[in-house]
Image (spheres, coloured by chain):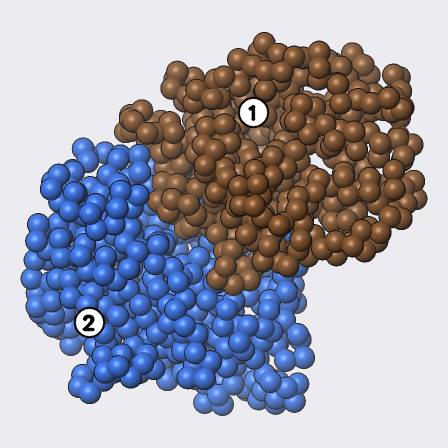
Amino acid sequence: MEKVMSLPKEVYQALLKVVGPENIADRPHILAALRHTNPQSGRQPPSPAAVIMPGSVEEVREIVRICNRHGVRYNAVVSMFGMGGVVSQPGMLVISLRRMNRIIEINEFDRYAVIEPAVRQVQLKAEVFKRGLTYPTASAGPSCSVLANFLTSGDHHTQQSSSRCSRYLLGYEWVTPTGEIVRVGSLAHGAGWFCPDGPGPSLRGLVRGYGGWGGGLGIVTRIAIGLDDWKGPRVLTTQGHSPDYKIPFPPDCHRVFIFKFPTLEKVRDAMTEMGKAEIGQAVLKFFYATEAVLFTVSANDFRDLWNSGLYQRELPRALWVYLAAWTPEELAYEERVMRDIVEEFGGEPVDASITRKYEENMDFFILVSFLQRVLKLGGGWSPTKLGADSIHHMFEVAAAIPEFFYDFIEKGRILDAPHNFQVIPMEYGHAAHIELLFFFDNQRPDWQQIPAEVMQKSMESDIRHGFHAATPPRVKAVMERLGPLYSNFQVWTNKIKETFDPNNVSNPGPG
Amino acid sequence: MDKLTDYRYTMKSCNSCGQCRFILGPMMKGWEYAEICPIHLRYRWDACSGQGLINIAQELLDGELDYEDGLIEHIYTCTTCGACDINCKSVRDMEVMDTILALRARCVEDGRGPLPPHQEQARYIEAHHNIFGEPHEERSDWLQEGIKLSEKADVAYFAGCATAYKHPDIARNTVRILNAGGLDFQVLHDEYCCGAPLWRTGQVEAARKLAEHNTEVFRENGIRTVVTACAECYGTFRGFYPRIAPPDFEVVHISEVVQRMLRADRLKLKGKLDIKVTYHDPCLLGRLSEPYVPWHGEIKSFGYHEPPKTWRRGTHGVYESPREVLKAIPGLELVEMTRHAENAFCCGGGGGVPAAFPDFALWTAAERLDEAKSTGANAVVSACPWCESAFQNAIDADKSTLQYHDFTGLVVRALEL
């Protein structure tokens, strides 16, 4: 590891005055947890110079102003899950928002919740369920930050009946990269949190980030999110002990079905028709290997299940449907419509043992409580693609995956799971999201190169075909290559960055 | 004995997912009481968590981190409650707790640890065989006349240091229950400290000697079953002794004994107790009480363990026995805290924390009592003398109206003994 760069003494002292000695540290052992090589990326990140924990928006503003005054680059973090490294350059300041963890308001009448950055998915979910409400919950696991996922795309399993998290972002409070507090949407006019946009252009895109280095601009300290009605139980009844939990839902109004189809085109068409019919709390083509990882406890159990070949036989061309209704009659109607569509496209139920896993773990659809199980094959796991477009386009992207994916499989560098992608429609088929997950073995000597190489090949495939399949990170070299596919968006994001962050101190990326 | 290097895979595999800091998703019931790691809840640094401690272990092992000022104190702030471990292992194949314990052992091996109060405890144990430095010959002074002992029984009651010297009522209640249920047992006058305070602070060689002594005493006296009312002793017999040698005795907690006696109609809980209680699961009786099974093998591609490993994921902790017994007491209403069973929040009484960081121990107990109060209970019940000390200190400091009861005390009252 490189020698840790320290902050200049006067800068450290100025920061200490803002938060007090309990909330700032630069000792190497405290920083050790912020420079660990994450097996997801394989990269050894640089060490930050210090970490600071503000407790209010005013403290955040003061910290950001000090950083601008002294040219100190910073990155704000909450959970750190999924990050390739906390900072992108040596000598940066980590602004940890852990202390800002309050639910400010849950407004049942106007249906929004106002939260601080460190409120976790499961905390808010449990609180809104008690009130018969819910919100789109990014499939990032129970302990990730709600706020962070609403600032990114935040895709999730139930977006058939809702949308991406980012579409539910309402008013928000933002400390700009230079340290100005801006309140956006109806909040700017003292009209409360209910609306994201005031008169004039929407500002939501300005703060939209991407996980890790080069993410959003400045620091968002409070957001309001929209809430929907919740058809499920107000308190989840959990059975069993770790790791064998079960969360069943009342079956008269909540049912899960999984159908296999002869071709991916049939999956696509069935998915499209279900959108037209506006049925399904969740409809998705899910990852089959990821499912096997999620529903087994140990790496050994996974290997046994995977080697049995059951999932490879049943799930490469399957459609998952979760029906939720207010009444048994409503459920029966949706089921009839669903079965008509499935029959039309030649679908048939998969092995009942697979469906049973979901019936016993309904939290999969609303929370993915055990999401971190995807890490259990040694932590070597990574997603790519992560883009969105029409359902048809997403399946075109899927059809091209073998072009670059098989090479990695044949060389034994990634798990042999060529169909491990998901397509999730949003807003009843108005658009869809695609994600390709791959597992790599961190016992291999070349493991640290694998994730970047797969992502590179995936991006090259998208460019070659002209696909809208990637969510471009704010990394200049990548943006320049992908930009032409997306109306040269990078020209504008670069201008926005230069305007709002003239000192390039806010999450600057690797440089 | 495991070395820090044995946990390379765990160190390398951590994705910083945060599961070691929060109770499991399916068990979370709201905004409050969502966190599980005492040091992270108090200090908030990533370094103050299971993840942070294994990151530190890795850097120490790789020579990237020195024994700088504050590092040893940092490592010893952890209560070793194992909440990080069980939460991690609900989703991963990693050994967080054992890595932390091996890190402490490494500090001791390097001559950097433990902290002075732990060294003092080790000296007391060396000289007097108990953690408090009390005379060894007074270890069984709690024993009163009228208790029926059977010198030839293959069952022994093991009191442990905290019960024998600080909470003798627990010992007296335990043996009265055993007598009432008609169980023949011995009290071994040459029992030594079980070794928990040394094991949990990295002083494993000294702990090994205690384990060897106690095992030999059991053997000499023909003991096949050891009954204890101390969670620390229970967890140490099951979690530490098998690391020394395969145990040739069974360990049973008094709550399990009472449960069996009730089911066999050997005891009758007749006395009515009009009380609303919540039960606190001691860490070493609950999530950390599964027997340790040695594993020697190879971790192959994609984390496959060859041969298959027996994981201790907290599934089979002693959760139901005390609850079943408490519910059987007439008039007693049992309510659960959000964080219970394998997700119980620590009382702050373990890992050498009360000796080295009494303020933090008190803070941790107060956090737990706050949760106990939120249930509407007027008393918290547990089954460990260390938990009793921790909670009683916090109750006294807060002048709380909440009461503390040891499990055995309530059972004796319900038995009308």
CA distance for labels 2 and 1: 53 Å
Q: Write the residue at 87% across / 38% down.
A: B417
Side of A8 relative to A40 (left or right): left
Residue A17 placement (x, y as % from top left):
20, 47
Disc 2 on helix, strand or loop?
A: strand
Residue B334 placement (x, y as % from top left):
72, 55
Q: Which chain is blue?
A: A
The answer to whether residue B177 of the structure is visible from this angle is yes
Q: Are marks 2 and 1 on the same chain?
A: no
Disc 1 on helix, strand or loop?
A: helix
Residue B91 placement (x, y as % from top left):
52, 50
Question: Which shade of the palette goes to chain B?
Answer: brown
> Looking at the image, which is closer to me, B314 or B226?
B226
Q: Chain of mark 2?
A: A
Q: Write the residue at 56% across / 45% down.
A: B399
Mark 1 nearby-residue class (10 Å; few <14, some 14–19, many ≥20): many
Q: Is residue B167 above or below residue B380?
A: above
